[in-house]
Image: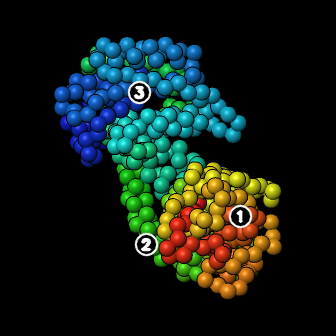
Amino acid sequence: MNKLPISFAHLLEVISRLPAPERLWVAYSGGVDSSVLLHLLSQNREKLASNLIAVHINHQLNQEADSWVKYCKNICVKEKIKFESITINAKKTKGHSQEAYARELRYASLKSIMGTGDLLLTGHHLDDQAETLIQQLMRGAGPEGLAGMPHVRKFGPGWLARPLLEYSRSQIKDYAEHHGLKWIEDESNQDIEIDRNFIRYSIIPYLQKRWPSVIDILSRSARHQADVVSLLKEIAEQDFEKARCEHQNILDIAELKKMSETRMRNLIRYWLKKNGHKPSSTAVTEIIIRELIYAGGDRMPVVKWHKTEIRRYRNKIHVMKPLVEVPVDTHYIWNLEQPLNINSGSLIARRAVGKGIKSESINDNLVQVRFRRGGETIQPAGRKETHKLKKLFQESGVPPWQRDRIPLLFINNKLAAVTGYWIDDHFNASETEQGWEISLTEY
């Protein structure tokens, strides 16, 4: 714990770790923590190189919610601080805890207003850190969860900082009372049916009877876990470079099997996050190791969870979003002058010389886009023979689940190109001919 009184100098030291943002947002609920944070900034505005904006999230969970918006706005008008409010419907949906659902929507809303390089400040403090650690312990979290809340982290296109994280709740309240601040008291913060409140009012006071410094102790443990997380990330980065394939969403199983299962689990978590997927649970991670990585070489198993799939093919594992079924009769008439949005992404055609489908073979820049039904053949440019797509896909190692989703371009009912792979020799632009290069940008 920082035993010195709360000061703007310390706050400035935290936020100066980042380049000065054009906009400095303060998450202002009207509670004592955010009120102290806003007061510190307001009283030292001349020392800031950024535009100060207070943002209030109306969760619509309390009958006083609208009056809280007015209260926060009036404070900002009085202090001449720009104020914005965002209204969300944070009422619990099936399968969510109220607290977790509200937090998820709140952070998503805050991200939506952030510009590149913007900085968001929140009033989280030392007691919040200790409560978070206990809550994560009860969830069986690993080092990343037990590391608690960092002082600074990436947040959408900008950054999030918690400059009061070294101060206790009592220090914050002392500051507020000393400066005569007023704040909102949300009665839901007393509801011990909410996990965090139960920890705050029932668990921590009980622990403090035996260990008076429990808040400091738990926060110190969180810092130790943060060091562990940093080290695990370094190891995962090294392992990723060894196991990755041409595309970062594919890992080589032979390289994975050289690792201990501990490092394997660590790499899987890192790999999922790097590809924009939520980490798998402990149980799912074990299934990935047992049923994908150690599966028989001729098998093509798949593991699915929370908008994520991992599939195995030819000694590699692929992570992706769940595949969308493409009806076999799906077809489009595509004007190459404009991008074409299809089920898996956006088809784009660019004019080129000596590349792609020769322009003179296309009437009015129109081609037909279809998908594989079976039996299609093509004579790839530079080859003398016609081959079945099935055989070409096998030769090229194209995973089976991708084959029926690759756009096929037809001209006068003749297969002219397989997007990303082959152009039929009869339609291939020579070195001096005008052509259309086709590419698919996946969603």
The residue lying at 77 percent from left, 55 percent from top is 330
Q: Is residue 78 left or right of residue 273?
A: left
Q: Is residue 190 visible?
A: no
Residue at the spot 34% in from the left edge and 22% down from the top edge? 82
30 w.r.t. 11: above or below: above
**Above-or-below relation of 274 to 296:** above
Q: Quadrant of residue 313?
A: bottom right
Q: Amino acid at mark 2?
A: Gln
Q: Disc 1 or 3, which lies upstream in sequence?
A: 3
Circle 1 residue: 410
Pick the front one: 36 or 191: 36
- Please tell me the numbered disc located at residue 238: 2
Asked whether the residues under the numbered discs 3 and 2 touch, taking CB atoms below 8 Å apart as contact, a structural biologist would say no
Query: Which is more N-terminal, label 2 or label 3?
Result: 3
> Gap between marks 2 and 1, in whole Å?
44 Å
For the question of whether residue 235 can be seen, the reply is: yes
